[in-house]
Image (cartoon, helix red, strand yellow):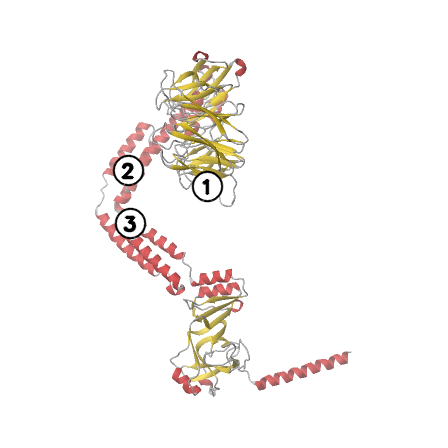
Amino acid sequence: MIVMSNTSIYKLNLVTGDILATGQMVAAPDWGYTPPTYAEGMIFAPLQNGTIQAFNAKTLESVWVYRDNLKGQSLSPIAYSDGYIYTGFWNSETGNANFVCLSVTDEDPSQPNEAKIASWKHTQPGGFYWAGAVVIGDAVIVGTDDGQSGDSDPAKVYSFNKYTGEMISELDVIGDQRSSIAYDKASGKIYFTTKCGYLYSASVNAKTGVLSNLKGVKQVNDENRNVMTTSTPVVYDGKVYLGIGQYFQKGWVLVADAESLEKLFTVSLKGYPQCSMLLTTAYEDTGYLYLYSTYNYLPGGISMIKIKTDATTAADAELIELYDAEGFSQYCITSIICGPDGTLYYKNDSANILAVGMPKVAKVINLINAIGTVTLDSGSAINKARNAYDSLTEAQKKEVTNYSVLTTAEMQYELLVAKFNAKTELENYKNADDYREAQKIELANAITAGKEAIDAAADIAGVDSALAAAKAAIDEIKTDAQLTEEEKEDIVAAKKEAKEALDNYKDLKDYREAEKAGLAAAIASGKSAIDAAADIAGVNSALATAKAAIDEIKTNAQLIAEEIESSEDETVTIELEDFTGLSKDALEAIKGSDRKVTFVKKENERVLYSWTFDGSKIDNIIGDIDLSISFTTNNKEAIDELVGDRNSIYLSFTYKGELPAPAFIKVYVGDKYEDGEKLYLYYFNEKTKKSEEIATGLEVKDGYISFTLTHMSDYFLTKTKIAQITDEKDKPKDADVIPEDKSKKVKSKDVGVGTGDTFPLAIWLIIFSISLIGVAYILIRKRRTI
């Protein structure tokens, strides 16, 4: 059995009522009298705010959740057909609400709360209240409220195509249609009721879904007075059985002719039956049918009506009060369901699921034995055993050999509950936040002593006495109003500290300009929330929330990593739009990608300069790098004096020092030099005011010069060859050359020159000669071997 309570859904053992499985619902049901529906191995639960949640019937794990855009109370039963469910919602007498069709398919098994989208929906003024649909062929048929404040204005009964939602047919009826639609296949008719007391029938074309031959009769009670009915009709063997009555007053079971809909007779009940009757034909061969009904009045039990199969008057029917709900007396709207062994199950407003049958003595003995050691969790087991025992006849009760175990368990449980309630009351008697720390200790000690006295009590009177004594002791402990002022001072300090922490939480230089604006906004919002906090917990929460919001803003390093990840190019190109800083994290991202990444700086749509790093060669990342290059320098006059003209291109790198890997630099020089011209690249030593030749023969191609550096400082490009430093002590200790050899020079005819590759030509010639001698020697040896 599946039941819902608050935000939990339970699977219960039919025999014992034990919980077999539990699931978590995203919302509670509305009022709790509309049960879930089972189909396709799933449970479909109607919940608050227009919510339907699907569960795996075996595990009660969530499968998907539907939330209707108009929301509303989920009061109507859920109908199933061919992989779809149908139900409606209700907002108010006049408000709009939807009737929806939902596919039961789990489109995304990995998401237990995936958002289900309606296959189709119909919006209706007044909505759908207890309006259960019926599916006949390709049509789904459902009734509506009348959309007015009263209960006797015109309402609708619609027939929709169950797959598309296209309206096939509609009928006008009088009053809110608040029952499920019953279908009698033998006659091809549907039957339903309206709240103002009408019983209706209509013909249905099973192939087309077209409705016709509407007939309605306003029913009255046995005193010929007007009545209400929200009961779903039960149609059998030419008769219709339904409940009629008035709220919280006397009610009746009405028996009508299925063709004319005229009343045959009524049977008086204790209250208004708003349920669907449960009819059994199991004893029809004895000449009787049996109806089982609840009623919305005290005590909220079960009435059984024994009716002759050919009954035409009330004299042919007998009312038997089958179950009086003793111990569970409350109002009841729900219908009864029958288990495979004939046990009747229902619930009333006592918040209990009730199983009504005829338990045997052995079953009662087993239920008592199942109680075991009494704990606070034993209440359900004790209640089951007590209810089962009380349902026995006096003769059967005498056969229960362990009845004393039950009475002892009841006394033990009552005392345990009393102690638990007393200790809970003691814990909640005072608010510890109203006390200074010293008084909080006194308060805690008093509560502990009180609990010990409660636990030591031998009976409920002792529990009450211990609770009273503990309260009296607590009342002697005084609060201190000054604590409030101290707390205020603490809050002021906490707010100041939190805002300072927020200011220092991130470094602006790690972000691009667009993200800096978001960062500033998040900090400002966080400070506002901190200022608005009422206590230290609120300050901490506001700070945590602000930090979480800031953490969502991506750093330059994160954006670079994403751009690398999203690019399929061998070399990833990233434009230096509003940032030039390359953080240590960004370098780590490039290193981890093992790809080449080029950073391009543009001006007026032209590439001014670019840096290229090979991720596979990055090593020893020391810190952040600023990629900006200035084409002016404070050393201009000294450089011009060295060159002898003012036509040099100055390259002042903002970052100074060693790089984590060789950087391939490409610089636009087309404003000063022609393609094909050969340039020299020099390092300018600010201490000595002298230059060091880094590369020669750099050819201008398409307006650009390219070279590779491992160290950043001030450089310049010129067509003029400058006399070099001859004194070793005057050479820069950290000259901008590739680390393997800082004494080499290279003439480069193409892109990618290593800085300072100046290995002497003579040495190259000597190496080449030795190589030739070695080759000749090997050839001679081979000939001798042959």
For label 3, the residue is 535
Note whether residue 398 is visible. no
Alpha carbons under labels 2 and 1: distance apart: 41 Å
Note whether residue 528 is visible. yes
- Disc number at residue 65? 1
Of the residues shown, which amino acid type is indicated by label 2?
Tyr
Are the residues tagged 3 and 2 within 8 Å (C-beta)? no
For label 2, the residue is 429
- Disc number at residue 303? none
Q: Residue 123 vs residue 618: left or right?
A: left
* Nearer-the-camera pick, 169 or 535: 169
Q: Position of residue 125 (x, y in %)?
A: 39, 35
Alpha carbons under labels 1 and 3: distance apart: 37 Å
- Extreme residue toward the right, this view: 786
Quarter of the C terminus within the rendering:
bottom right
Along the polypeptide, which appears first: circle 3 or circle 2? Answer: 2
Of the residues shown, which amino acid type is indicated by label 1?
Val
